[in-house]
Amino acid sequence: MKTTKAAKSTPAKPVAKKAAKKAAQKATAASGKATGVAKKATATIKKAAAASKKAAPAKTAASKKAAPAKTAASKKAAPAKTAAKKAAPAKTVAKKAAPAQAAPKKAVVESHAALVRRARRINRELAEVYPYAHPELDFENPFQLVIATVLSAQTTDLRVNQTTPGLFAKYPTPEDLAAANPEEVEEILRPTGFFRAKTKSVIGLSKALAEDFGGEVPGRLEDLVKLPGVGRKTAFVVLGNAFGRPGITVDTHFGRLVRRWQWTDETDPDKVEAAVGALFPKSEWTMLSHHVIFHGRRICHARKPACGACPIAPLCPAYGEGETDPEKARKLLKYEKGGFPGQRLNPPQSYLDAGGIPAPPLGAG
């Protein structure tokens, strides 16, 4: 019985072995597949790494190429920015060009030598613009000139020139005017303004000439300033234009312009005369006065200077206070520069030759 059980149980071993073998084969196959998958995964990773390495140099090259481009662009942009900075003054000039927005002018800081050079250059250029500059009061002798100059206070030379022909026709000498009826003289001088005070001055002046100087106008400053109504300004007008002796005439035009040009900041006429006289040779004083006064009447006006038509604009620290547009500035010009009549009824021939137009007589137009 025992023998039979043992014999019957032996076949189970081969079955187990076969099962184990199959399981082993399946495990090997699975392992092989897993290995293949792993190999494929490894290959994919390697390919990705290789692609990454190739991409890196390209990126580096691209970034290197891009960097110079950026640098070049920034370098090109830098001059543009610099140019913009350089362009800024143009904007400033534009602001100055608008009189309503113009900032107050600051004093030009310059040495005395530089001031002298600039002042003399201005005078030279004005001499070229106004070669026919002259006293704008009509006169035939020193007596007529001193009377006309006294009458020019607080009025225009044109108004005086329209008035004096009637005065000198009736009172041709100092003795005649000294003996005149004041009421008759007042009526003649009425158009000049302040006619009562002016009548008193010209009659008193004529009496002093008749009594103290033999009816002749003295040719010395110290004598002239003793006459009623005659100050340094009037005296220098007479000395410079009737006697040929140099003098600076500080009228409202002269004072205004020399302050705009920063030749001096003085307002007292005597101090202005001294300051400006120190910048020029004495021989130039009389014509300097004519040049400056001509320019003040024609272009550099008190209220609205014609800056855009000014021949000395590059030398003027006050450029921009007036109209800078050339077309608009030209419309502001007075007297011969704008085609209008001048101040004198009988101007010098040089003025007429230059295109100057005589003033109309009193009551004409």
Image: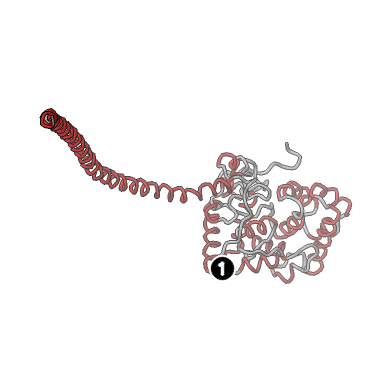
Give the image location of residue 313, x and y in percent.
55, 52
- The amino acid on which the numbered mark 1 sits, given as a three-letter code, is Pro
Give the image location of residue 298, x and y in percent.
62, 48
Q: Is residue 359 left or right of residue 29?
A: right
Colour scheme employed for the rendering of this structure: secondary structure
> How many callouts does the rendering have?
1
Depth order, front residue of 328/97: 97
As displayed, is residue 263 above or below residue 78? Answer: below
Helix, strand or loop status at disc 1: loop
Depth order, front residue of 143/72: 72
Depth order, front residue of 14/278: 14
Give the image location of residue 309, x and y in percent.
56, 46
Q: Which residue in the protein does label 1 denote?
A: 281
Q: Is residue 168 left or right of residue 312?
A: right
Which quadrant of the figure has residue 57? top left
Q: Is residue 35 left or right of residue 96?
A: left
| Residue sticking out furthest to the bottom | 222
